[in-house]
Image (tube, rainbow, N blue to C red):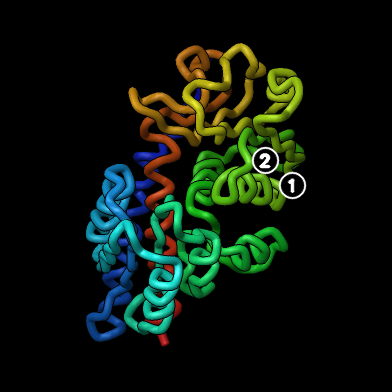
Amino acid sequence: MSALLLDGKSLAAQSEADLLARVDRLKAGSGGRTPILATILVGDDPASATYVRMKGNACRRVGMESLAVEMPAATTTEQLLAKIEALNNDPNVHGILLQHPVPEQIDERACFDAIALAKDVDGVTCLGFGRMAMGEEAYGCATPQGIMRILDHYRIEIEGKHAVVVGRSPILGKPMAMMLLQKNATVTICHSRTKDLPGIIAQADILVGAVGKPEFIKADWVKEGAVVIDAGYHPGGVGDIELSALSEKASAYTPVPGGVGPMTINTLIMQSVVSGERSLAH
């Protein structure tokens, strides 16, 4: 039996149609005002510039505006904190995205945590993570929240399942594990120092690859009928999991590209629209 393809690209397109209608309603009810996402790009990393441009394009597709803030590679932590503070205090800005990674002289965590909770639409602050982990209202970190939306849309059963997350980054692996736990999965988090990684992956009903290494997770480690989510993307269009051999073995899987990536950006945009609705509806 062929596995179900968890198509994030088509789901993101459906969501954009809904978001466009929501933004139109918001404009009509607020005298033409629109949600605005501020994107901060520090330095000239070409991949980061591409991601920021893609996010700006996604804003425009749903009728939102994006405010592109570009800062030089020599920017200090203090200068970046001052810029974030100015955006926090700007009533016209409803979401703030600080593109990761920033140049090494900057304290990235301090800058992430300076973003106001109400504008943390990328879900990167410690406060937002803590609130989410405690089941309180907060914007979810965009990639894991996008994955949860894929699982929900395709009615993948989570409760009682053994979910294995390979990776423990603060913006992917850790929040992913907490979100699955909130939905009553039994969660194992693995990482580079995990002993017998293939043996643990073989127990996974739901497997999330977020390790950041091309095809690091081998198809023969995955058990028959597992749901496979690949959150990686590497040159050549491969992810963190050896997907080519899984189409007949897994019960469902995300393709690379076209799976998790489009839903990451879409989740950022959706959460920016929600923030705009909360601010402009009053």
| Residue bearing mark 1 | 184
Pointer 2 local density, CA inside 10 Å: few below 14, some 14–19, many at least 20: many
Q: Which labelled disc corresponds to residue 152?
A: none
Residue drawn at point x = 70 percent, y = 37 percent: 189
Q: Is residue 69 left or right of residue 83?
A: left
Residue drawn at point x = 58 percent, y = 66 percent: 138
Residue drawn at point x = 56 percent, y = 33 percent: 211
The amino acid on which the numbered mark 1 sits, given as a three-letter code, is: Asn
Q: Is residue 5 above or below residue 78?
A: above
Viewer-nearest residue: 29 or 32: 32
Alpha-carbon distance for marks 1 and 2? 7 Å
Viewer-nearest residue: 105 or 31: 105
Q: Are marks 1 and 2 in contact (CB under 8 Å)?
A: yes
Counting from the top left corner in percent of width and height, residue 4 is at 49, 26
Report helix, strand or loop for mark 2.
loop
Answer with the quarter of the image where residue 271 lies. bottom left
Counting from the top left corner in percent of width and height, residue 217 is at 57, 21
Q: Is residue 226 above or below residue 249?
A: below
Report helix, strand or loop for mark 1.
loop
Q: Is residue 105 left or right of residue 200?
A: left
Can residue 140 be seen?
yes
The amino acid on which the numbered mark 2 sits, given as a three-letter code, is: Ile
Q: Is residue 164 above or below residue 115?
A: above
Quarter of the picture holding the C terminus? bottom left
Pointer 1 local density, CA inside 10 Å: few below 14, some 14–19, many at least 20: some
Can residue 100 be seen?
no
Counting from the top left corner in percent of width and height, residue 215 is at 50, 21
Q: Which labelled disc corresponds to residue 158?
A: 2
